Image (cartoon, grey):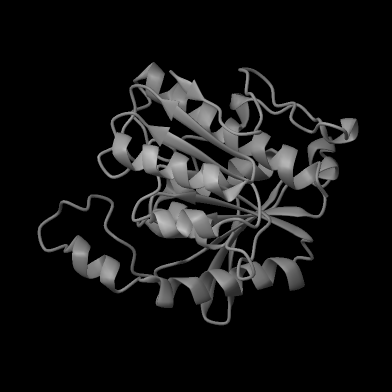
Amino acid sequence: MRTSTLSNALLLAGGAVAGCLGKPSACQSVDASIVAHTGEPLGKEVTHNNITLYIAEPDAKDPRTKARAGSAILFLTDVFGLALAENKLLADSFARAGYLTLVPDLFQGSPAPGDINVPGFNTTEFLAKHEPAVTDPIIAAAAAYLRTELKATRLAATGYCFGGRYSFRQLADGEGAVDVAYAAHPSLLSEEEIAAAVAGPVAVAAADQDTLFNAEARAAAEKALLGTGKPYQVNLYSGTQHGFGVRVDLADAQQKYAKEEAFLQAVRWFDRFLVTAA
């Protein structure tokens, strides 16, 4: 795996997370053992303003939770949404890391099928129904719920594929709802959207075999990130394809490792720029 760390972002090392510089009490160990790949989701679903929200709450007695009190994660999914168990399990994993995590249903009960290649499903039509004009208000309402109902004072966005684009959009200067962003294998992300994300630090986890966020798109993203003048980071994971941040072949040790490292990359980023900066 090749890791590219750019600008004045953190250098990442394997093992436990220790990114809370300047705030030792926040440096509570988190490692890959907390990542749930299979099993039953542990969070709960609520409905607010006709939007379904999946909430993963951290253990209040865990020192990691106390260290990250007031900080929360807005989890923006791929096109499979809340119907995909791995999305909920990943939210649960962030909760075990000490972060209150909320996942809005971006598709109002009608996400893409688990296999987008099934006959009858038209990806172009699906995406046209979920343009920013439709999706941004859903995310804004979820962010407002985190701040007003769940009393979070600082928010991070973590986005995957479809959601990766929106984690950038939520960091837009003067318009964004979050303070820090992370995106794994983003899709449909424009250079203009990257350049607009100048309100805070942003990190990216990329797959080396991604046809949607390929080498050319990564190069353009790095150039745009450099122009923001904010801390940023781009990590490239070998032996991975689009979607590896959420779904992988668990029998493939490299893919499993990459998914777990991408998760830890996000936690380190949030610890450094969300918790420590608070």
The image quarter containing residue 153 is bottom right
Image x and y of residue 17, in percent: 70, 26
Image x and y of residue 147, in percent: 74, 68
Where is the N terminus found, in terms of image quarters?
Answer: top left
The image quarter containing residue 190 is bottom left
| Residue 102 in view | yes
Viewer-side residue, 220 vs 207: 220
Viewer-side residue, 226 vs 44: 226
Image x and y of residue 276, in percent: 81, 41
Q: Which residue is drawn at 60% across and 45% down?
A: 92
| Residue 41 in view | no
Q: In this view, does 172 lie to the left or right of 128?
A: right
Which residue occupies the extreme bottom position in the image? 49
Which residue occupies the extreme left position in the image? 119
Q: Residue at x 43, y 28 (%)?
A: 236
Q: Which residue is drawn at 71% across and 47% down?
A: 99
The image quarter containing residue 93 is top right
Q: In this view, does 174 lie to the left or right of 136?
A: right
Residue 101 against residue 262 in the figure, above or below: below
